[in-house]
C-alpha cells in the first residue's frame, strides 16, 4: 500500500491555486515554503505553500490521474472541490506537520 497525494496549495491571499502530486506531503509543503518568492517555479513565484486540499491514494497513477483531472477544472470547479473538503478554506499546514518548518529546515 502506497502513500501518494494529490494536493492544492494557495498563497496567503488565496488568489492563486497550485495543484500537485507527491509521495511525501509534509516534505513537499516544506519545499513550496522554502521556494516562496523564487520566480523560476510557479508555486514559488506566487507564494503558494498553504495547503487547502489533499487526497491520498495507494497507487501513484491514481494520484497522477486525479491531478490531471483537477488541472482540467475551471477555477469555479476547483473552488467547489476545495469547499467540499475544507468549507472554511482553512490553511491545513498545522494539521499535517510542524508548522512553520523549524529554523534548521528554513535556513537551508
Image (cartoon, rainbow, N blue to C red):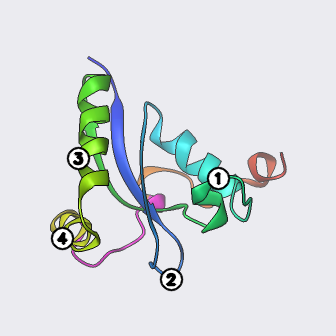
Question: Would you say 31 lies left or right of 74 here?
Answer: right
Where is residue 21 drawn, in percent x and y?
Answer: 41, 39
Is 14 within the magenta? no
How far is disc 1 from disc 4 in space, using C-alphas? 26 Å
Tell me the residue at 47%/61% (across/down): 94
Mark 3 against mark 4, which lies toward the viewer? 3
Mark before the other along the chain sequence, 1 or 4: 1
Which residue in the protein does label 2 denote?
A: 13
Which residue in the protein does label 4 denote?
A: 80
Mark before the other along the chain sequence, 3 or 1: 1
Secondary element type, mark 4: helix
- Image-quadrant location for residue 108: top right
Question: Would you say 89 lies left or right of 98 here?
Answer: left
How far is disc 3 from disc 2 in space, using C-alphas? 25 Å
Mark 1 against mark 4, which lies toward the viewer? 1
Which residue in the protein does label 3 denote?
A: 69
Residue 41 marker: 1
Q: How would you rate the neighbour count of disc 4 (Cα within 10 Å): few for under 14, some for 14-19, many for 20 or more?
A: few
How far is disc 3 from disc 4 in space, using C-alphas? 14 Å
Mark 3 against mark 2, which lies toward the viewer? 3
Tell me the residue at 32%/33% (across/down): 64
For the N terminus, the quadrant is top left
Residues at circles 3 and 1 in contact by the CB criterion of under 8 Å: no
Mark before the other along the chain sequence, 3 or 4: 3
Tell me the residue at 73%/65% (across/down): 37
Q: How would you rate the neighbour count of disc 2 (Cα within 10 Å): few for under 14, some for 14-19, many for 20 or more?
A: few
Q: Which residues are magenta?
A: 86-94
Where is residue 35 drawn, in percent x and y?
Answer: 70, 54
Residue 1 higher or lower than 54, as above or below: above
- Image-quadrant location for residue 38: bottom right
Residue 31 higher or lower than 51, as above or below: above
Secondary element type, mark 1: loop
Amino acid at each position: 500500500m502506497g502513500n501518494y497525494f494529490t494536493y492544492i496549495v494557495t498563497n496567503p491571499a488565496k488568489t492563486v491555486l497550485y495543484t500537485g502530486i507527491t509521495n511525501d506531503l509534509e516534505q513537499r509543503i516544506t519545499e513550496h515554503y522554502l521556494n516562496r518568492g523564487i520566480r523560476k517555479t510557479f508555486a514559488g513565484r506566487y507564494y503558494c505553500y498553504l495547503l487547502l486540499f489533499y487526497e491520498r491514494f495507494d497507487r501513484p497513477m491514481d494520484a497522477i490521474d486525479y491531478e490531471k483531472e483537477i488541472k482540467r477544472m475551471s477555477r469555479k470547479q476547483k473552488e467547489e472541490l476545495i469547499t467540499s473538503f475544507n468549507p472554511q478554506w482553512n490553511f491545513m499546514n498545522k494539521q499535517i506537520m510542524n508548522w512553520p518548518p523549524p529554523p534548521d529546515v528554513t535556513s537551508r
